[in-house]
C-alpha cells in the first residue's frame, strides 16, 4: 500500500512539473513571436523604473512615435475640413464629406486621448475641434523626444514637435505590452509643469494598461544604417523647407562659425542652391560608429555632402562639407594616400566647393600667380565659373602626369550632375601639394 501511495504521489508531481513547463514554454513562445519583441538588440527585458527622464535613444520606439504623430496630423486635417474631393461634386456633397471627415477625426482623438487626461482636464468633444483649429499647415518636424520608463510595460514620452510652424507638445503614454498608446495634450504639460528636468516622483500618470481600439495601436519598425542615413537627409531637408530656424539650429556650432556666422548667410546659401530640399535623395552614405556618437556621411543627387553627427536617435548636428572643417575620416584617407591620390582628393574638394556655390573657398585655393594672371578678384572668378562650369558638376578623371615632381596634372571632364545639359567641359587641372593637407591649383579649359 505504501508503495502504491508513493507511485501515485510521484505521478502527481511529474504531472505538475509537465504542466508548469508547458505554461512557461507557451509564455516564452508568445513573447518571442509577438510584435513586442524588438529587433536590432533592443529587445524588451524586465527592468526597474528609470531614475530620471532621458533623451529617447531607441530608434524603434522613435519611429513608432513618429508614425503615430503622422496619424494625429492626418486627423487634424480631417477635423479642419482639409480633405481631397472632386471639384465637380455639388457644394452640398462637399459639406457632407467634410462633415464625415470631422466625425472621423473627432472619433480618432476620442480613441487616443487618455481617460486620466479627460477626467483631470474636464476635456469635452468640442475641445478636440478647438485644438485642431490652431493648425493651418500640416508638415511635421520633431524637435526632441524624452523618455521615462515608469514600469516594465509603461513608457512616458515627452514629445516636442512642430506642426507647420506651430509648436506641438504632448505626452504620449505607451503600453509596450499591448502596443497601444494614449496622449495628454499640452495644457496638461503646462498645468503640472512636465519637463525633461522634473523629478520623476512628480510624474502622476498612472500605470494602467491601455486597452486596444481602432485608433491607438503602434508597431515597431526595424531601422538599419541605410534607413537612418535616409531619415537624417530627409529630416534636414524638411527642416530647411519648413522651419529654416530649426535647420540652422542643427548646424554644428564650430562649422557655423566658420561657414555661416549668421542666419542670413545661411538663408542666402539655401536660396542660391536652388534645390528642392524636400526631394533630396540619398545617393551614397558612410557610417562610422564611435564611442560616444555615430557619424553618417550622406551624399545627395547633386553631389552635395552632409555630415551628421548623431549623439542619440534623431539628435544630430550637421556640417555641409568636409573642407571647411576637415573630418577625421578625410585626414586618415589623406595620410595613407599617395601623391596622385592626394591630388584627386584635393580636386574633389575644389569641385565640392563649386557645387556648394562656395566661390570664396574655391578662389582661396587658387595658385597666387594663376590668380594674378587670370582672376584678380573673387568676383571675376565667380562670374567665369558660373559661365564655364555647371551648377552641380560631376567629374571624370582621364590622364595624369607629374613630369614636374611638385606638380600633379590631371585631364578631367565635367558633366552636368543634374542632367539638364548634355555639354561636356574638358579641363586640365594642376595641383600643388603643400604642407599637411593644404594645396593650391590652377586650371586650363579646352575651348
Image: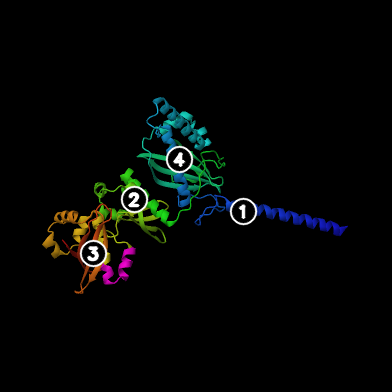
Instruction: Work out which quarter of the rendered image holds the C terminus and state it.
Output: bottom left
- Quick one: label 2 or label 4, which is nearer the N terminus? 4
What label sits on residue 71 in the rendered view?
4
Where does the image place residue 260, in percent across and percent down from the top left? 26, 52
Secondary structure beneath label 4: helix
Asked if one can make out residue 383 in the rendered structure from this viewpoint, the answer is yes
- Quick one: label 3 or label 1, which is nearer the N terminus? 1
Q: Which residues are magenta?
A: 328-343
Near-viewer residue (74 or 319):
74
Which class describes the residues within 10 Å of circle 2: few (<14), some (14-19), or many (20+)? some
Q: Which residue is mark 1?
A: 29
Instruction: Work out which quarter of the rendered image holds the N terminus and state it.
Output: bottom right
Where does the image place residue 127, in percent across and percent down from the top left? 45, 30
- Quick one: label 3 or label 2, which is nearer the N terminus? 2
- Quick one: label 1 or label 4, which is nearer the N terminus? 1
Q: Residue furthest right?
A: 1
Q: Which residue is mark 3?
A: 412
Whether the magenta-drawn stretch holds residue 14 is answered as: no
Judge depth for marks 2 and 4 and give the one in front. Answer: 2
Q: CA distance from mark 3 to mark 4?
A: 50 Å
- Quick one: label 3 or label 4, which is nearer the N terminus? 4
Judge depth for marks 3 and 1 and give the one in front. Answer: 3
Near-viewer residue (145 or 120):
145
Q: Quadrant of residue 381?
A: bottom left
Where does the image place residue 173, in percent across and percent down from the top left? 50, 42
Secondary structure beneath label 3: strand
Vertical order, 137 against 51 (above or below)? above
- 212 sits left or right of 103 in the view: right
Which class describes the residues within 10 Å of circle 3: few (<14), some (14-19), or many (20+)? some
Q: Which residue is mark 2?
A: 280
- 181 sits left or right of 311 in the view: right
Amino acid at each position: 500500500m505504501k508503495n502504491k501511495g508513493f507511485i501515485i504521489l510521484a505521478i502527481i508531481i511529474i504531472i505538475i512539473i509537465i504542466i508548469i513547463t508547458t505554461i512557461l514554454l507557451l509564455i516564452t513562445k508568445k513573447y518571442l513571436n509577438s510584435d513586442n519583441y524588438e529587433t536590432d538588440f533592443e529587445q524588451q527585458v524586465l527592468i526597474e523604473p528609470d531614475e530620471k527622464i532621458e533623451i529617447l535613444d531607441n530608434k524603434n520606439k522613435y519611429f513608432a512615435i513618429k508614425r503615430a504623430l503622422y496619424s494625429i496630423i492626418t486627423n487634424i486635417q480631417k477635423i479642419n475640413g482639409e480633405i481631397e474631393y472632386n471639384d465637380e461634386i455639388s457644394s452640398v456633397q462637399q459639406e457632407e464629406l467634410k462633415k464625415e471627415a470631422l466625425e472621423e477625426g473627432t472619433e480618432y482623438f476620442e480613441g487616443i486621448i487618455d481617460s486620466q487626461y479627460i477626467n483631470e482636464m474636464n476635456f469635452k468633444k468640442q475641445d478636440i475641434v478647438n485644438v485642431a483649429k490652431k493648425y493651418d499647415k500640416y508638415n511635421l518636424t520633431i524637435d526632441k523626444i524624452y523618455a521615462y520608463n515608469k514600469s516594465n510595460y509603461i513608457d512616458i514620452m515627452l514629445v516636442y514637435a512642430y506642426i507647420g510652424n506651430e509648436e506641438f507638445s504632448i505626452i504620449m503614454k505607451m503600453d509596450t505590452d499591448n502596443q497601444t498608446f494614449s496622449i495628454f495634450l499640452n495644457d496638461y504639460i503646462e498645468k503640472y509643469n512636465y519637463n525633461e528636468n522634473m523629478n520623476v516622483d512628480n510624474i502622476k500618470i498612472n500605470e494602467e494598461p491601455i486597452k486596444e481600439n481602432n485608433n491607438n495601436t503602434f508597431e515597431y519598425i526595424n531601422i538599419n544604417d541605410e534607413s537612418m542615413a535616409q531619415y537624417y537627409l530627409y529630416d534636414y531637408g524638411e527642416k530647411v523647407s519648413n522651419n529654416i530656424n530649426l535647420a540652422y539650429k542643427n548646424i554644428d556650432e564650430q562649422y557655423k562659425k566658420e561657414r555661416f556666422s549668421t542666419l542670413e548667410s545661411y538663408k542666402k546659401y539655401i536660396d542660391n542652391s536652388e534645390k528642392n530640399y524636400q526631394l533630396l535623395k540619398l545617393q551614397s552614405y558612410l557610417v562610422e560608429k564611435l564611442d560616444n556618437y555615430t557619424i553618417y556621411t550622406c551624399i545627395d543627387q547633386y553631389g552635395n555632402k552632409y555630415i551628421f553627427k548623431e549623439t542619440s536617435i534623431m539628435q544630430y548636428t550637421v556640417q555641409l562639407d568636409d573642407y571647411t572643417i576637415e573630418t577625421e575620416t578625410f585626414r586618415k584617407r589623406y595620410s595613407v594616400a599617395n601623391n596622385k591620390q592626394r591630388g584627386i582628393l584635393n580636386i574633389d574638394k575644389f569641385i565640392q566647393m563649386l557645387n556648394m556655390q562656395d566661390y570664396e573657398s574655391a578662389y582661396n585655393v587658387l595658385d597666387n600667380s594663376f590668380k594674378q594672371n587670370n582672376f584678380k578678384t573673387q568676383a571675376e572668378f565667380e562670374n567665369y565659373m558660373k559661365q564655364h562650369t555647371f551648377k552641380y558638376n560631376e567629374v571624370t578623371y582621364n590622364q595624369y602626369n607629374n613630369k614636374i615632381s611638385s606638380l600633379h596634372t590631371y585631364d578631367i571632364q565635367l558633366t552636368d550632375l543634374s542632367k539638364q545639359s548634355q555639354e561636356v567641359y574638358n579641363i586640365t587641372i594642376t595641383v600643388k601639394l603643400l604642407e599637411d593637407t593644404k594645396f593650391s591649383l590652377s586650371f586650363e579649359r579646352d575651348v
